Structure formats: structure tokens, C-alpha cells
Image (cartoon, grey):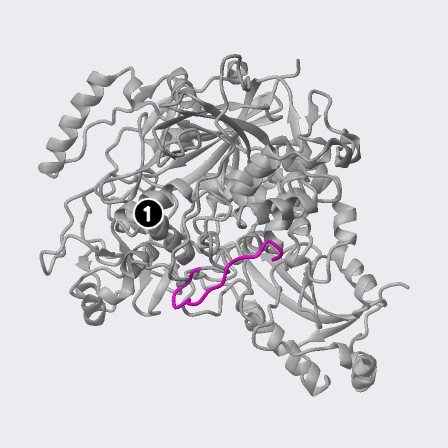
């Protein structure tokens, strides 16, 4: 049926209004008023990145409160039978020059989208906004303009008002949550700055009313540098910044030491909360601070005197070079949600791989058709949505010729409203994760493994794109006293290369720089020009292949603890090799630090010499005897140094991981337990409850009288699911977990060392998908029981890398460089440009693809 409008004008409209209540009667049972806890998605489509700013606007279901773009609302109607939707549309109208008289733009129905995200500046002097809302009844598309309080039934009016005034669904309700969604300050646009000649130096700051040199805040109106108060950010202060506001009324201040090219910590005394300032670069420039030149130094200060050619921030972001913007499919940027650049950098690299493109974008219609009723809570739907957003080109369109001419005439370059916001994706993939669900900066390597874990658990039929990363590592452990060996295999997804600092080729320059740096720090002068350690890649590869000591090694040959060494080799080579340069370490104060080094990563990589060889002639295997389990006489939970547990937990580690660390290090203190955490934090069961041989269940605070574990007890279903997602049979997963006391890592080792009898093994062809293996063979340990491995040659070509700027994973910024269509492209949040000088030597994570034999 053709789309019809319910209301015309004049008398016809009045007649129609009288029938309005009768028209809505059949649909009243499907119209709900949002309750506390309901999430109203009025800013973004569940299947695409359409929003009220888009040409077709956004349709919000009045029953589920999910949002849908014009091309997806029909699917939801057919699937659910829901007929009533609220259509939201924001119109952007160019102003006639001089028409506004310099006043702020008028906005019709301004309260309708009070909490609506927008790509534009609502106070833009060149355009004004008109917001429109209406109810639409499917399938005939009858439209009822809003507000329409007098004619609508009371329930409908209340429901519409609740939807329109609802807050963002991504704002957490828990007051103790780490995550906080910052809002733009009402003072940002109209902030008055006094021209008093104040210039802020790059270091040596001190409160102008006391001697404090920490927790200092720069008032953005008069340039006063004053100390903060303890309750605001957790550090000490005398509250002089707040006193200054009460005396002068100057509302905004920025915390010194937090200014980077990506932003800064800003507080509004008037609004009494942390805020955003879209004009912060201009406000800082008033006091002589250039944001683009700012970077972190070791003492926490920021300095803008580093020369561009050596500054990590400038080199990696290719600042100072005119970069050509890229548009179209595969050249779509991602909005930074506040320290979400780690997520964007990883996803840009992931979706440049054909297997991921085929799995999610190629299967997009099927994924969308079979998505659950709430697609915002389905991993595959959100991956398909994000992949389509990045690869379709729909959100990466070049500016029109008229816009280019206007920019040249005004001598300014306004960012285009291109790119996508991964807010819905981030909310889902980080749900329940203490780190990724926060707004703090994270380690891109940890997020990569987290994402692969989600892919493994949510495979689409027999298709699993993460197969391209999976490989087997052969670990050879040798007892130094008996010289006997044990060979085991484990699954991994990336190669971690240590930084061989001792192999630096410019040691003399480094020593001289360190002396000058210490002298400058003591005299509180700007540091000297940075000298970065130059490390040969061959030295890092050599360090990877060298034997390492095994702590607390128990020799089955000696039936006692002994010295042991371990070497690692590739039992298979993956289709795509991910290489992490282990730049991050810990200082004496246990704060994560980064090694600022340059590694000459090769474009072509050959690691065939690292192929595993297995048991060699003349080698004797260690007996397959497990160490004795010591069961205490007193069947109660073990003693636990709770003070050490809490000390570790306060650092942000999961409580159960802290308990395990203290238990397995024999209550020897928080420092020793911390080392255990660092060595084991990448294990899948890192945060799972402590399971002790000889006790049932777990050892937790207050636990007592725990019985012994019986072999008939069923292992946790999530562990079984994780192992079966790797390609193993369910019965094998259960047997392995029972045999290893539900230890996931040991269960995998057990599977490799206990193959099932041949007659019980399925044919490899029953479980292998051979579609995408033109250049490799899929191997399987013991038929269908082994993980899916795409083995082949160990020769690779570099096609992408992720770089980190900053001093630790807790701060800084990530960008990615990817090679597309024969040229390098830089992806820096929303900015996507052709790269002129890709900094291959400063990367953190590198992506290689196999070269066909």
C-alpha cells in the first residue's frame, strides 16, 4: 500500500484528530512506557549506523525501544509484528548570511533530542537545526506528528514523552561504575578568556597560592595554576582551584599533565562534573599551549619542545605532513569514544582480512535475518554491522565540490560527518569485563585476544574466521640434571617477540642522552632531544628462540624439583601471523612502562627455521608421571594472606586472580604474588575461582568444610564450550577437564598428550572446511579432536601494524597503518589518509600474511 499521511491541514486535520484515539486502540497493548532499566536506542540503528541525522531518520520501536534505520525497520516489523514506531529526524538548514544577526541558531522542539548524540556542532554559526518526531503505524505508514498531547491517548502521550526524554542507553546506572559518559560543557562555546599575557611553561608548574606541584589545574579564563581538592581526583590538594572559582566565577579548568593531542581532563566548577570542551585546542593556544605538540614524559609532565622528527606522537601520526584524505569502501574512520582507539585500531586491521570480511559482511543478510529479537546483544550481528560500516563506503563519502570551494574560501578544513561510532559494539563486547567496559585506555594486544575469544565462542556454523590466526606451539622442556625432555603442544594466536635491549646498535648515544636527561630533570629544564634505542629485528627473533629457565620445575625423572629449560618452536604456521613487540614492562614502582625503541621490522619475513622438529634421535623422554598431590590433614580452606590479596585487588586485578596468586606463591607477600599475576594474566582461567586439588568447589573467603572433587562431577559448561569451540569433541573436552581438575590450560595439554583410539576418531573431512585453503592444508590432531589449523609456509609479507603513543598501556593513543591497493593508509580514529611516511619501526603489533608457495 502507498504511504499515507494521517493528517492533512485545516478542517481535514481536525476531523482526523477526532479519530486518533480510535485509530490507536488496536495497537495499545503493544505500546509500552520505558521502565527503569529499559534501554532506549534513539541514537543509532541496531543493524546499521543510521541515526536521526541520516537522510531517512531513525525509527524507535514503541515496544522494545530498539532503533532501526529506514532499510531495517521493515525487517523488524515483519519479524515481530510490532506496528508502532517513533520516527526521529534532525533537519540541518543552512543559514542565510546575516540572517541570524550573530545569535545562536534557533532549534524547533529543542527538548525532543535533549540527550541525542550529534555529529555536528549545535551552536554552529552557519547552520541551524530542526528536530522532528512523529509516530508511524506500519504497514500503511500512517504518520502522527508529535507533540500531539490533546488528541493522543494518555498512555501514548506518557510513552512518547518518556522515549523522547530518555537518557543514553550507554550511560551506566551503577554509581560505582568506572565508566562515565562525559557531556559537552555549556560554557565551552561561550567561554571568555582574558588577554592578560599569561603563557604556561612546559614544566615546573606550582600552585600560585601554595607550594604544591601535583594535582594542578589551569583555569581556562585567566590562566591561573591552582591545586585541586582530594575528593575530585583522588590526589591531595588544598582546594585553591575551587576557591578561585567561588571568588571569580571562572567555570572551566584543565588538569596539567593530562594534555595530549587527543584531549585533556577538563572540569566544570559550575556544572560540578568532568566535561568535554570541543574548543579545548583554541582555549589552550590562548595560553601558548599547542596540543598537537604535547606528549608524556617519564616524570608525568608534558613538554612541547621535542623536535617533530623524533617525537613519537608526531612521527606515528605523521604530523607536519600534508596527508590526502581517503574515501570509499574500506576507508571509513571510527569515532573515538574516549580512550577507545585501541578498539578501533584492532578492528580496522581485523576487517582488512578477507576471511573476516566473508564471514561477517559476506553473510550479512543471513546473520541479520537470524539475529535474536534484541540484535544489540548478539555478537555476530554487531560484528556484521561494524564490518559493513567499515567496508561499504556508505559512511565514507568525499565532500561535494561546493563544500571544497567553501573550505578554500574560508581557509579552513572542517571535518566531514563521515565515519562510524562503535558505541553499541563496544558496549556489547566489553560487557562484564572490568577493563574493557571502562573508559580507561587498554592494551590493544589484550583486546585482540579478547575479540578472538568472542569469535571462537560465536562461530557462524562451521565457519570460523579466527582459524587464520591459530597455530600450534611446540614446547620442549628439558631437565638440566637428567637431560631428559618432554614435548608438548599448545594453541596460540600471536607471536610475542622480546625486545633485545642489549643488542642496541647506538649504545654510546643512549648513554650520553641518559646523562643529559638526568641533568635536565635535576635542573628542571626541558629534556634534550630524544635518542631512541635502535634494535635489530634479528636480535629480537634470536631472543625468542633462545631457551628460557622454567621456574619451580618438577622433574618426573628425578621425582623432585630441578632446574629446567624450555624452548618454543612453531608446530604449524598460521595463515596470518600476528607479531607483538613486547615493549611494555614494569618499573621499580610496579607502574607499567614502555620501552621507547625502534625495531627494523622487515617487509618480508621468513621464519621457516623456527619450524618444530619433535623428538630427535638420541633424546630420551621424561616419564609421564604427575607430581604428587599433597592433601593436608585438616580438610579446610588454606590459609590466605588477605592483606596481600586486597593489596593486589586495589591495583585493579580480579579478586579471584589475586587469591590464586597469593596461594600459588605460598603467602610470600604481594610483590612475589604480583610477579605470578604478570606471568599468568593471559591464561584463559586467569580470573576463575581458585580450585585446589583435594578440595571441592573453590577456595574463597570464608569457605570451610569443603569436600573432595569427584570424577563424576560435571566440569563448568563455559569451559566445555570454550574447548569445543576450538574444534575438539565435547566428550574429549569433559574428559580432559575432569582429568586436570578443571584447569583449562592443563586440559588442552592433556588433549594433545592423550589422543583417542583411532577407531573412535572421526574423519578429518567431517569437521574441516576447505573453502579458503588454496595456499594451506588444514591439519587436525587425531582426526576431528584437534584444533583447526591452517598450516603452510613460514614466509610472510607485512600488510599492517598498530602503533602506540604514550608511556604505558594505561595512557596514550593507538593508530593503525594498513597496506591497501598497493599503498599504505593511516587510520587515526575518524581520520583516514594516504600515508606518506609509515613508521614501521615504531609499531607495537604487526600483521603479516602468508606468501603463497
Residue most extreme to the right: 1
Q: Looking at the image, which is closer to me, 71 or 348?
A: 348
Question: In the rendered image, which quarter contains the N terminus?
Answer: bottom right
Whether residue 413 is visible to the viewer of this picture, yes or no, is yes
Question: Is 820 situated above or below 760?
Answer: above
Check residue 712 for magenta coloring. yes
Frontmost residue, 568 versus 618: 618
Q: Is residue 490 left or right of residue 339?
A: right
Determine if the magenta segment contains residue 814. Answer: no
What x and y, as percent, mark residue 328? 64, 35
Q: Is residue 810 left or right of residue 687?
A: left
Q: Badge 1: few (under 14), some or many (20 or more) residues near its Cα, within 10 Å?
A: some
**Residue 791 placement (x, y as % from top left):** 64, 23
Assign the C terminus to one quadrant of the image.
Answer: top right
Does the rendering let one see residue 45?
Answer: no
Magenta stretch in the rendered image: 699-713
- Please state the horizontal and vertical placement of residue 666, each as a whole percent of the image: 31, 49
Q: Which residue is mark 1?
A: 665
Helix, strand or loop: magenta stretch: loop
- At 9% from the left and 56% from the top, the residue drawn is 211
Residue drawn at the location 18% of the way across and 59% of the way down: 226
Q: Residue at x 62, y 64 (%)?
A: 41
Amino acid at each position: 500500500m502507498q504511504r499515507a499521511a494521517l493528517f492533512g491541514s485545516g478542517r481535514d486535520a481536525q476531523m482526523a484528530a477526532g479519530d486518533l484515539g480510535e485509530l490507536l486502540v488496536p495497537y495499545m497493548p503493544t505500546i509500552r512506557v520505558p521502565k527503569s532499566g529499559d534501554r532506549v536506542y534513539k541514537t543509532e540503528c541496531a543493524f546499521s549506523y543510521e541515526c536521526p541525522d541520516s537522510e531517512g531518520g531513525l525509527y524507535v520501536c514503541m515496544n522494545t525501544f530498539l532503533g532501526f534505520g529506514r532499510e531495517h525497520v521493515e525487517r523488524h516489523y515483519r519479524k515481530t509484528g510490532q506496528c508502532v514506531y517513533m520516527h526521529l529526524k534532525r533537519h540541518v538548514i543552512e543559514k542565510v548570511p546575516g540572517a541570524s544577526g550573530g545569535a545562536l541558531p534557533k532549534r524547533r522542539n529543542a527538548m525532543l533530542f535533549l540527550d541525542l548524540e550529534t555529529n555536528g556542532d549545535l551552536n554552529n554559526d552557519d547552520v541551524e537545526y530542526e528536530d522532528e518526531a512523529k509516530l508511524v503505524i506500519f504497514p500503511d505508514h500512517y504518520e502522527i506528528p508529535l507533540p500531539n498531547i490533546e488528541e493522543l491517548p494518555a498512555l501514548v502521550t506518557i510513552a512518547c514523552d518518556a522515549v523522547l526524554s530518555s537518557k543514553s542507553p550507554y550511560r551506566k546506572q551503577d554509581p560505582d561504575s568506572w565508566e562515565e559518559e562525559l557531556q559537552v560543557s555549556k560554557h565551552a562555546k561561550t567561554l571568555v578568556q582574558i588577554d592578560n599575557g599569561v603563557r604556561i611553561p612546559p614544566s615546573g608548574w606550582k600552585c600560585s597560592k601554595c607550594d604544591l606541584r601535583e594535582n594542578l589545574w589551569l583555569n581556562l579564563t585567566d590562566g591561573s595554576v591552582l591545586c585541586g581538592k582530594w575528593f575530585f581526583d583522588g590526589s591531595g590538594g588544598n582546594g585553591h582551584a575551587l576557591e578561585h572559582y567561588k571568588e571569580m566565577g571562572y567555570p572551566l579548568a584543565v588538569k596539567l599533565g593530562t594534555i595530549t593531542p587527543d584531549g585533556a581532563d577538563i572540569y566544570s566548577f559550575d556544572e560540578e562534573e568532568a566535561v568535554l570542551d570541543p574548543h579545548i585546542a583554541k582555549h589552550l593556544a590562548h595560553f601558548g599551549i599547542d596540543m598537537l605538540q604535547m606528549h608524556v614524559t617519564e616524570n608525568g609532565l608534558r613538554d612541547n619542545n621535542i623536535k617533530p622528527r623524533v617525537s613519537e606522537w608526531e612521527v606515528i601520526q605523521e604530523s607536519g605532513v600534508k596527508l590526502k584524505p581517503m574515501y570509499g569502501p574500506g576507508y571509513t574512520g571510527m569515532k573515538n569514544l574516549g580512550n577507545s582507539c585501541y578498539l578501533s585500531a584492532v578492528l580496522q586491521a581485523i576487517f582488512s582480512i578477507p576471511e573476516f570480511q566473508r564471514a561477517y559482511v559476506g553473510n550479512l543478510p543471513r546473520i541479520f535475518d537470524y539475529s535474536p529479537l534484541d540484535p544489540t546483544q548478539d555478537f555476530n550481528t554487531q560484528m556484521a554491522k561494524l564490518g559493513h560500516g567499515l567496508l561499504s563506503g556508505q559512511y565514507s563519502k568525499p565532500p561535494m565540490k561546493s563544500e571544497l570551494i567553501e573550505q578554500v574560501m574560508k581557509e579552513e578544513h572542517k571535518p566531514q560527518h563521515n565515519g562510524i561510532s562503535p558505541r553499541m559494539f563496544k558496549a556489547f563486547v566489553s560487557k562484564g569485563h572490568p577493563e574493557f567496559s571502562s573508559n580507561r585506555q587498554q592494551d590493544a594486544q589484550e583486546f585482540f585476544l579478547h575479540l578472538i575469544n568472542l569469535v571462537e565462542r560465536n562461530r557462524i556454523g562451521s565457519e570460523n574466521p579466527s582459524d587464520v590466526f591459530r597455530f600450534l606451539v611446540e614446547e620442549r622442556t628439558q631437565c638440566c640434571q637428567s637431560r631428559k625432555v618432554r614435548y608438548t603442544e599448545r594453541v596460540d594466536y600471536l607471536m610475542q617477540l622480546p625486545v633485545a635491549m642489549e643488542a642496541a646498535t647506538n649504545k654510546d648515544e643512549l648513554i650520553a642522552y641518559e646523562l643529559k636527561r638526568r641533568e635536565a630533570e635535576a635542573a628542571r629544564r626541558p629534556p634534550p632531544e630524544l635518542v631512541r634505542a635502535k634494535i635489530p629485528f634479528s636480535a629480537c627473533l634470536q631472543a625468542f628462540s633462545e631457551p628460557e629457565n622454567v621456574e619451580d620445575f618438577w622433574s618426573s625423572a628425578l621425582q623432585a624439583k630441578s632446574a629446567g629449560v624450555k624452548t618454543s618452536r612453531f608446530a604449524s604456521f598460521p595463515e596470518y601471523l600476528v607479531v607483538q613487540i613486547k615493549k611494555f614492562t614494569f618499573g621499580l614502582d610496579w607502574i607499567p612502562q614502555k620501552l621507547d625503541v625502534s625495531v627494523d621490522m622487515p617487509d618480508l619475513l621468513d621464519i621457516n627455521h623456527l619450524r618444530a622438529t619433535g623428538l630427535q634421535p638420541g633424546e630420551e623422554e621424561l616419564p609421564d608421571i604427575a607430581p604428587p598431590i599433597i592433601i593436608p590433614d585438616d580438610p579446610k580452606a588454606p590459609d590466605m594472606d588477605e592483606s596481600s590479596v586486597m593489596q593486589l585487588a586495589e591495583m585493579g586485578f580480579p579478586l579471584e586472580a589475586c587469591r590464586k596468586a597469593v596461594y600459588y606463591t605460598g603467602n610470600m607477600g604481594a610483590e612475589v604474588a604480583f610477579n605470578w599475576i604478570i606471568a599468568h594474566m593471559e591464561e584463559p582461567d586467569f580470573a576463575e575461582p581458585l580450585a585446589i586439588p583435594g578440595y571441592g568447589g573453590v577456595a574463597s573467603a570464608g569457605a570451610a568444610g569443603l569436600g573432595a572433587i569427584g570424577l563424576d562431577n560435571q566440569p563448568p559448561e563455559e569451559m566445555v564450550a570454550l574447548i569445543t569451540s576450538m574444534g575438539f569433541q565435547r566428550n574429549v573436552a569433559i574428559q580432559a577437564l575432569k582429568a586436570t581438575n578443571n584447569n583449562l590450560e592443563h586440559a588442552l595439554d592433556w588433549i594433545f598428550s592423550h589422543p583417542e583410539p583411532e577407531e573412535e576418531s572421526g574423519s578429518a573431512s567431517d569437521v574441516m572446511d576447505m573453502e579458503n585453503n588454496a595456499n594451506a592444508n588444514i591439519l587436525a590432531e587425531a582426526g576431528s579432536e584437534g584444533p583447526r589449523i591452517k598450516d603452510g609456509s613460514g614466509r610472510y609479507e607485512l600488510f599492517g601494524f598498530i602503533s602506540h603513543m604514550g608511556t604505558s598501556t594505561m595512557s596514550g593513543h593507538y593508530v593503525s597503518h594498513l597496506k591497501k591497493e598497493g599503498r599504505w593508509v593511516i587510520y587515526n580514529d575518524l581520520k583516514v589518509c594516504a600515508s606518506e611516511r609509515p613508521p614501521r619501526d615504531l609499531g607495537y603489533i604487526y600483521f603479516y600474511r602468508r606468501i603463497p608457495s
